[in-house]
Image (cartoon, helix red, strand yellow):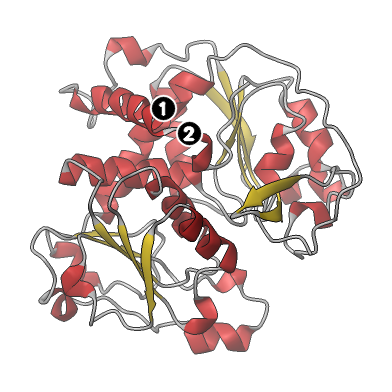
Amino acid sequence: MRHLIDFGDLTRAEWESLYQRCSDIMDHPASCFRPPPPVFRAACRGRVMASLFYEPSTRTNFSFQTAMLRVGGTVFGFADPKSTSTAKGETLKDTIKMVSGYADVVVMRNPKEGAAKAASLYSDVPVINAGDGHMHPTQTTADLTTITRLRGKVDGLSVGLCGDLKNGRTVHSLIKALAKFEGIKFFLIAPRELAVPEYMRAFMREHGMWFTEVTGLEAVIPQLDVLYMTRIQRERFVDPLEYERCKGVYVLTRRKLDRAKKELLVMHPLPRVDEIAIDVDDDPRAVYFEQARYGMYARMALLTDLANQEREKPEPVEIGVKPACSNPNCITQTEHYLPPLVKQNGGVDCCAYCDKELR
């Protein structure tokens, strides 16, 4: 059974097939504000999507629900785990086994790293990661759709990633996705305490990706084809004082854009706080609201594929003697029944749930 846990699960050919389906939906004259083409309008008729959101979301939650409705399916779920049996102590495993008996596809957001991977071990239906503690692959489908649609290609671009690169799951997923393309240059713009984590550096080195880490935006903005802004995420900080030190470090203004290329794409996964000034919205290079709309079409294309798989019992997980993960935000720290799983990142043993090196 195919799940979407990490964008790395897709080959470039699979992505291009998904994008073509998305493009077919968008190119229909009525698709912007009215129903999609008839061939897609009933693509998920009779199918049911379970929407399990363990943390707040606007765009991802709404766009998934809208996407499923537009392709003819129906939706149930929750947006507040306190109103479910999770509040009574139900395990993720039990929730997933129960919900996958009701639905044809499970869409889940959870703040714990590796939660979607854990869910996929026990689900009878495809699991789509709508954002866990370190990856957000369907946001990446929105990002790549935006770049491809507006630039015509992805290969050969210089991409600036700016803000919280340590905790930014959208950034981590985008880096993994862009490893499938040729000639990408990354400018990683962040304060040192919010720099990209080491396992992502190891990933980029392993895949021969060009990158440089800088702390200032203005010096590199003239070189960029894409500027991907992110907010400093208060909810990811354990220490409130550290958040106060980091917030507001990068603010994109119209004045800073004066030095940028005329064809630059300014992107943001949203929500923004203060990292993009309101007056930037009127600049034609600001495409973040289009990016959000493209996310709906990308999820429509994804659901027409995954929601129509046949139900299948998950394969038994082989439990061996393997080192346990020490990452405090890994799903294995709260769901203690999970088997320890190991993957290789750059020749190093890492936790298969959260990608952190095992020591």
Give the amino acid at mark 2.
Answer: Leu
Left/right placement of residue 22 relative to residue 97 reads left
Q: Is residue 34 visible?
A: no
Tell me, yes or no, if residue 275 can be seen here.
Answer: yes
For label 1, the crowd category at 10 Å Cα-Cα, with few meaning under 14, some 14 to 19 and many 20 or more, is few
Residue marked by disc 2: 10
Residue 14: numbered disc:
1
Q: Residue 53: where, in percent of width, then height?
A: 62, 45
Residue in view at x 78 percent, y 35 percent = 95
Q: Residue at x 46, y 55 (%)?
A: 170
What x and y, as percent, mark residue 39? 32, 10
288 vs 121, left or right, is left
Amino acid type at image mark 1: Glu
State the residue at coordinates (46%, 41%). Answer: 138
Does residue 31 sit above or below 172 in this rendering?
A: above
- Categorize mark 2 by other alpha carbons within 10 Å: few (<14), some (14-19), many (20+): some
Q: In the image, is residue 98 above or below residue 275?
A: above
Secondary element type, mark 2: loop
